[in-house]
């Protein structure tokens, strides 16, 4: 454990201990009033944790984080995830958004961050991935300029939100101003590699009706050749509130984009020139549409009813020089035909309808008020995957095929899940929160795939039942600090991507099983006045029948990846976040601030059974640390952040060098980012630089798109922007 971490740890222990010894002045009327006003969440400098309960959802005893995005200095125009979410301890990030993919993926505790497949990804409380059980990949994320706050709950979120090991991430969008009939916000940003981003929003409240809408347009030439992209994001919300007890709203979100994928690298090619490109004819688009409706009803001060329903209808299409031959295969004109080889075409269509009903009620039990929260989730998702179609020899975005599809498969998932949790308050400082969730899943797969020119038809139906139990404990020595602990079961069903490989060099075990396990936390968190914010904890996660890829060799001596239940794994370690404002500690009323923060995680994720017993889990870094310095006053703010992510491996074999594109070593890397903003009245200027040392590094190896091979992260870049509010 390094000296810097020990210093911060000692500082927080001494400060919080001294604070706890003071007379509990938090019981005064003045501070009780303040707590009522700030009932939503507690933060210091924009990072904090969720309350015991909020909007009918119980968070007591769970490890939570909340990030207020407007308080951050970050490159929001490009959704720089390590600046926006990087203070979350142990957050591993796949940086592919500007390398041929639509969104950076995230994960915690040594899980796979690709497309956030281990996370329950939501916007305004509803799911925004195609199917949390069958196709849980995040192709759409809202632009961070539209996000008010980001809420995160670790693995114990499975009882309230559904199956996942990684936990919940919820992007809460901005609301209409309550005291204006009309407000217009605009932000224009330009930067390196042809970046231009325009974000514009309107909102207002007229009597009982409020509205908010935004449109974002972004274009980027890219860090590498053949990586240009454009996207349009839009959102609209209309809310009618006939009384203080009832609010009804509808929302619509859309994404339109077109991306060119520059391909992946071998290790030697990456070392030679990480800015080059191996592909010039690879394209991807993923239009996304989500319609939702919400009814909030508060019949009394102790009871809330919340009903959300959403319908997602989206698709993803790609045409590419496929992974045959791996990243070494050159995509060049054949001298015998004077044409390129035909590309491969894949088209996926997805629909998902989900409804969630939540009811929360506070009731008197002894001298304290307890809280019962429960509900029911129902969803039906349909997914059609066509692939292996022989495309044209052209270079443009052409999805036409010259023959039959290699496979045409329909998948569906029906899910029904009742859930309930109860906060039992024992005295004024201690709570026990047991919970239960029951999951029923019906999965179907029909269609065909072609092998050796023959169509092989399939028709599968699977029914599964998963009871999930959990309990959370929390003790509050003061009103602003708490000791928390929890344990809850989790599972991850086999998804569509694990049933059918995208390409031909990856194969799948026909006897795959669902993964099961549990998450547990123990920690101490809180705030000391307005100068110290801390959350220090340990975790233990068991992940059984873990699905992953291993490297195998066929009879011809060719290597290929094989997706199977590798073995059981155990993930354990510590997660700490400490932020200390030096100026506010000396003078709480000062308008100036100098803050130092340290987000640190040590993660020991290893296989405990099977062929790879003792090996590290793929993509899992042992150490993730982000240290930052924040200088600010009422108008100006600057944040500089140092990011260090330890080494990892591409697959469970932990092999360092391989001809297979997904297997191999992922070296440790460090990155420095600085961002600043100056605000005057209704105007603001923002500027900054990312990867200031211009480090060449990568966060992902893949055997399919946007590769195959190594996908580099971006080198040094700059941005400047202007924003105004009218």
Image (cartoon, rainbow, N blue to C red):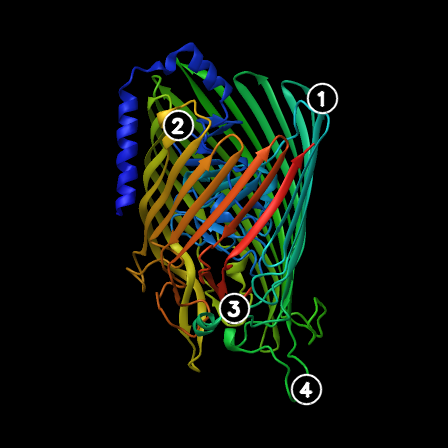
Residue 668 figure quarter:
bottom left
Label 1–label 3 contact, CB within 8 A = no
Mark 1: which secondary structure? Answer: loop
The disc label shown at residue 264, or none:
3
Q: Residue at x 51, y 74 (%)?
A: 326
- Bin the neighbour count of mark 4 within 10 Å (Cα to Cα): few under 14, some 14-19, many 20 and up: few
* Residue 347 showing in the rendered view: no
Q: Residue at x 49, y 71 (%)?
A: 273
The disc label shown at residue 208, or none:
1
Separation of residues labelled 1 and 2 (CA atoms): 41 Å
Query: Disc 4 or 2, which lies upstream in sequence?
Result: 4
The disc label shown at residue 584, or none:
2
* Residue 430 showing in the rendered view: yes
Q: Which residue is mark 4?
A: 337
- Bin the neighbour count of mark 1 within 10 Å (Cα to Cα): few under 14, some 14-19, many 20 and up: few
Label 1–label 4 contact, CB within 8 A = no
Mark 3: which secondary structure? Answer: loop
**Residue 671 % position (x, y):** 43, 54
Label 1–label 2 contact, CB within 8 A = no
- Bin the neighbour count of mark 2 within 10 Å (Cα to Cα): few under 14, some 14-19, many 20 and up: some
Q: Nearer the viewer, mark 1 or mark 3?
A: 3
Query: Disc 1 or 2, which lies upstream in sequence?
Result: 1
């Amino acid at each position: 454990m390094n000296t810097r971490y020990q210093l911060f740890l000692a500082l927080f222990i001494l400060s919080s201990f001294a604070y706890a010894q003071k007379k509990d002045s938090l019981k005064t009327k003045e501070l009780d009033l303040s707590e009522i006003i700030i009932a939503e969440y507690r933060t210091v400098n924009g990072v904090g944790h969720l309350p015991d309960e909020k909007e009918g959802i119980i968070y007591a005893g769970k490890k939570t984080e909340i990030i207020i995005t407007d308080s951050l200095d970050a490159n929001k125009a490009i959704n720089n995830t390590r600046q926006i979410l990087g203070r979350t301890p142990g957050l591993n990030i796949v940086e592919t958004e500007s390398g041929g993919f639509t969104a950076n993926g995230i994960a915690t505790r040594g899980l796979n961050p690709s497309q956030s497949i281990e996370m329950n990804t939501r916007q305004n409380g509803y799911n925004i991935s195609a199917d949390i059980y069958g196709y849980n990949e995040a192709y759409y994320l809202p632009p961070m300029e539209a996000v008010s706050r980001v809420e995160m709950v670790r693995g114990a979120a499975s009882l309230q939100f559904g199956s996942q090991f990684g936990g919940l991430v919820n992007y809460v969008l901005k609301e209409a101003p309550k005291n204006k009939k009309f407000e217009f916000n605009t932000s224009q940003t330009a930067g390196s590699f042809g970046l231009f981003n325009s974000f514009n929003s309107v909102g207002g409240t007229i009597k009982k009706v409020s509205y908010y809408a935004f449109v974002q347009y972004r274009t980027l030439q890219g860090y590498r050749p053949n990586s240009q992209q454009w996207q349009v994001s839009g959102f609209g919300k209309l809310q009618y509130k006939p009384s203080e007890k009832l609010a009804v709203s509808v929302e619509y979100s859309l994404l339109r984009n077109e991306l060119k994928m520059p391909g992946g690298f071998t290790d030697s090619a990456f070392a030679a020139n990480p800015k080059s490109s191996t592909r010039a004819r690879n394209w991807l688009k993923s239009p996304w549409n989500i319609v939702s409706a919400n009814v909030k009803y508060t019949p009394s001060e102790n009871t809330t009813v919340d009903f959300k329903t959403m319908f997602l209808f989206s698709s993803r299409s790609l045409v590419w020089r496929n992974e045959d031959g791996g990243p070494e295969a050159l995509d060049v004109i054949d001298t015998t035909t004077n044409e390129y080889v035909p590309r491969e075409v894949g088209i996926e269509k997805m629909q998902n309808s989900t409804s969630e009903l939540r009811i929360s009620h506070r009731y008197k039990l002894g001298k304290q008020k307890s809280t019962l929260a429960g509900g029911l989730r129902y969803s039906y998702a349909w997914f059609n995957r066509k692939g292996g179609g022989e495309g044209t020899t052209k270079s443009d975005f052409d999805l036409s095929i010259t023959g039959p599809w290699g496979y045409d498969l329909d998948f569906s998932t029906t899910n029904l899940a009742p859930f309930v949790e109860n906060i039992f308050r024992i005295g004024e400082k201690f709570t026990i929160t047991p919970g239960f969730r029951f999951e029923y899943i019906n999965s179907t797969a029909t269609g065909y795939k072609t092998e050796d020119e023959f169509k092989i038809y399939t028709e599968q139906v699977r029914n599964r039942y998963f009871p999930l139990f959990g309990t959370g404990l929390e003790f509050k020595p003061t009103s602003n600090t708490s000791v928390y602990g929890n344990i809850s079961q989790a599972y991850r069903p086999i998804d569509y991507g694990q049933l059918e490989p995208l390409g031909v060099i990856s194969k799948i075990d026909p006897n795959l099983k669902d993964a099961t396990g549990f998450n547990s936390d123990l920690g101490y968190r809180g705030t000391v006045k307005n100068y110290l914010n801390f959350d220090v904890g340990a975790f233990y996660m068991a992940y059984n029948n873990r699905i992953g890829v291993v490297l195998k060799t066929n009879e011809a001596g060719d290597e290929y990846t094989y997706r199977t239940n590798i073995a059981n794994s155990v993930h354990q370690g510590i997660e700490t976040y400490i932020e200390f404002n030096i100026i506010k500690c000396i003078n709480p009323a000062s308008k100036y601030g100098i803050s130092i923060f340290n987000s640190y995680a040590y993660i020991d994720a290893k296989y405990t059974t099977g062929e790879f017993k003792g090996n590290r889990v793929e993509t899992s870094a042992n150490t993730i640390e982000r240290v930052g310095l924040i200088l600010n006053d009422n108008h100006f703010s600057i944040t500089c952040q140092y990011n260090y992510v330890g080494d990892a491996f591409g697959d469970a074999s932990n092999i360092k060098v391989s001809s297979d594109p997904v297997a191999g070593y992922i070296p440790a890397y460090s990155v420095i980012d600085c961002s600043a903003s100056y605000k005057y009245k209704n105007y603001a200027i923002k500027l900054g630089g990312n990867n200031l040392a211009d480090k060449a590094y990568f966060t992902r190896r893949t055997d399919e798109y946007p590769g195959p091979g190594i996908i580099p992260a971006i080198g040094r870049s700059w941005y400047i922007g202007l924003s105004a509010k009218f």
